[in-house]
Amino acid sequence: MKLSKIIFSLFSFFAAQSAIAQKDPLSTEVWAPEPKIISPGKNAGEPPADAIILFNGSNASAWKHNNGDEAKWIVSDNIMTVKPGSSSIITKQKFGDCQLHIEWRTPAEVKGTGQERGNSGIYLMGRYEVQVLDSYNNSTYRNGQAGSIYKQHIPLVNVCRPPGEWQSYDIIFTAPRFSENGRVIEPARFTVLQNGVLIQNNVTVWGTTDHIGSPVYTKHETKESLLLQDHGNPVSYRNIWIREL
Ligand code: MG
């Protein structure tokens, strides 16, 4: 047989196979790897079986201050509350890509205005803040209200409950990737739901969420501590759990 004829025969054969595959539902079924089976929480907001519990009400032992001291925030009635002036707290364990569930409450007694009312914050990797603020009838710059990626992304909606009521964030965070020499290969990303409603949809983080100046990236480890901010207001937290992705 001539070479050209062989090639033509092979081509016809594979074309025929491919045409068969297009009509065969089995050819597009993927059976491996099988996703790991985990038990969900009984109700919305409860940790699934593979979650790491960061605060379940009993103690703040998963947390410390930056100087290494045990967390001095106030734990009572299954709630952890900022002790103003004690400084922010960070997790002893470090995390990269993750899913975080956290519930928070700004003080029922309304004090201050703008950024001075019920301010705290959840800093992924200790650097990238999802703002916690009493943004119920409290005007401030929009990229600094509750649910903002601080000074970078305004939340899609304001779905805040009144002060004194519990609210939740479900945060999906993708850590930034850096090259050996510190260049950003892939920036960080956030998806955030507040009280079950999407407020940040896979937004790109431009760098650390600084109070002053444009955000810039500085290379850091692939896993870093989660930080809760002491901004001088007695904001409370409960039911904090995280899943590494
Ligand atoms: Mg804050």
Image (cartoon, rainbow, N blue to C red):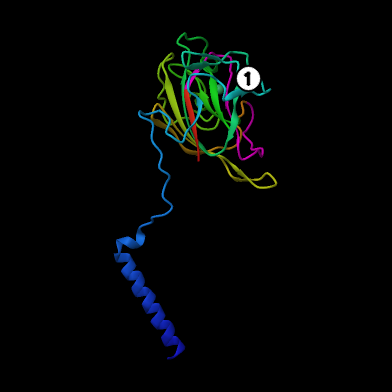
User: Residue visible at 59% across and 18% down?
Assistant: 230
Mark 1 = which residue? 70
- Is 136 left, or right, of 93 in this rendering? left
Looking at the rendered structure, the secondary structure element under dot 1 is loop
- Is 26 left, or right, of 78 in this rendering? left
- Using the image as rendered, state which of residue 79 and residue 140 is in the foreground: 79
In this rendering, the answer to whether 33 lies above or below 102 is: below
User: Residue visible at 38% across and 56% down?
Assistant: 30
Q: Residues within 10 Å of mark 1 (few under 14, many from 20)?
A: some
Q: Is residue 209 visible?
A: no
Specify the quadrant of the image occupied by residue 12. bottom left
User: What residue span does the magenta drawing correspond to?
Assistant: 212-238
In this rendering, the answer to whether 101 lies above or below 69 is: below
Q: Quadrant of the N terminus?
A: bottom left
Which x, y percent locates residue 199?
A: 43, 31
- Specify whether residue 225 is painted magenta: yes
In this rendering, the answer to whether 27 lies above or below 154 is: below
- Specify whether residue 8 is painted magenta: no
Which x, y percent locates residue 241?
A: 48, 29
Q: Is residue 219 visible?
A: yes
Which x, y percent locates residue 127?
A: 60, 31
- Using the image as rendered, state which of residue 243 and residue 227 is in the foreground: 243
